[in-house]
Amino acid sequence: MDPLLSELLTRGVLEREQWRELLSRRHQLDRAALFALAREIRARWFGNRVYIRGLIECTNYCKNNCLYCGIRRGNSHVQRYRLTQAEILACCEQGYRWGFRTFVLQGGEDPRLTPDWVAQVVREITRRFPDCAVTLSLGEWEREVYRLWYEAGARRYLLRHETADPAHYARLHPPAQTLSRRIACLYDLKALGYQVGAGFMVGSPGQSDDTLAQDFCFLQDLQPEMVGIGPFLPQHDTPFAQEPPGTLEDTLLLLALLRLTLPAVLLPATTALATLHPRGRVLGMEAGANVVMPNLSPPAVRESYALYDGKAATGVEAAEHLADLRAQLAPLGLTVAIDRGDAPTKRPQQS
Ligand code: SAM
């Protein structure tokens, strides 16, 4: 085995220089052996269980102007929508019947989305579905707002750090958005008791072995319960329209390295990965992922949440086709768990 991989397994961490070295020769690693090891570690923590989360894309209004994102403020070609509380609850109702026990409310940073409105929706979901977990992914807010939502019943929050390198962050975002603010939000969420998800796009413009090394060091420090990574995919109405997409090879390899670095992490095989390759979900599972987040949004709005071109929203990406997902996972010896799927380190009494 590669000596740096052995060191990662024994010490649980690598230094930035070591990460950079390992990442610089990642194409020489024995991928089959690495993926097998990642699956073995996953099995140790999760058995053969894969967790599903119903993704409800509640608004595509956004005050931010991230250079990579199709729903950025500056994109005037997007048909904007915002779901009502009744529509969100109807998605949960439907999802519950299909077997979902986690609902993820994700959206742009919609200036009309008030903290109280979100708290009210969270309260209503937890009241109606007491055996379900509510995950929020609504961007950067003050610590007191995160506290309000926690008190309302939200227990998980997804906020990708996007890159842990400040100069790279500045290449991906306008000056008003800073890495330090993003990181402060993640640590606020942790301190409040949330199960936290960080993450980054694979192959985003300007990413290098060194920025990735910093991502791994940051994740070693933060110790998030979840890490979302997927390939960067260009969207035709953004400044990055002509940039090349991230690769399947890199995404799978980084998923496996994340499983080795954070053995108990919840690791989704993302929609972006499934968009990049028709068997993306399955390949992600073979590389150590253990979460799938099918789309529970009302079908009429799915096309409008176009973060990147060609976004998969049908087949196993759609929550209504859970049977297809089960059938895809069965040959890998994996089953879909019908439960909240809390992080092993934060099971119910604490969550
Ligand atoms: N506004 C919230 C936030 O900032 O966390 C949640 C919504 S945001 C659209 C969700 C994630 O989509 C981002 O963290 C980003 O990594 C991903 N994303 C956006 N544009 C993308 C693109 N062109 N390719 C791949 N992923 C993209």
Image (cartoon, helix red, strand yellow):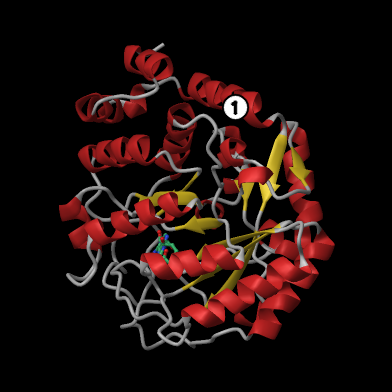
State the residue in front, 141 or 220: 141
Is 151 drawn above or below residue 88 in the view shown? above
Residue 221 visible in the shown view: yes
Residue type highlighted by circle 1:
Arg
Is residue 139 shown to the viewer in this render?
no
* Displayed-image quarter of ligand 1: bottom left
Q: Provide residue 216's location: percent of width, then percent of height.
A: 33, 37
Q: Is residue 299 above or below residue 191?
A: below
Which image quadrant for residue 235? bottom left
Residue shown at 70% from the left, 50% from the top: 340
Q: Is residue 313 above or below residue 229?
A: below
Image spot of residue 131 (x, y percent)? 76, 56
Question: Quadrant of the rendered structure where residue 84 is?
Answer: bottom right
Q: How many neighbours does mark 1 have within 10 angstroms: few (below 14), some (14-19), or many (20 or more)?
A: many
Q: Residue at x 27, y 36 (%)?
A: 213
Q: How many marks?
A: 1
Residue 229 image offset from top left, x and y in percent: 45, 48
| Farthest right residue in view | 97
| Secondary structure type for disc 1 | helix
Q: Quadrant of the N terminus?
A: top left
- Residue at (41, 76) in percent of width and height: 109
The residue indicated by pointer 1 is 39
Residue 24 place in picture, x, y as percent: 25, 29
- Name the residue rendered at 18%, 61% in the picture: 170
Left or right: 241 in relation to 351: left
Question: Does the residue tagged 1 have its C-beta within 8 Å of any atom of ligand 1?
Answer: no
Q: Is residue 92 left or right of residue 113?
A: right
Comparing 30 with 43, the one in front is 43
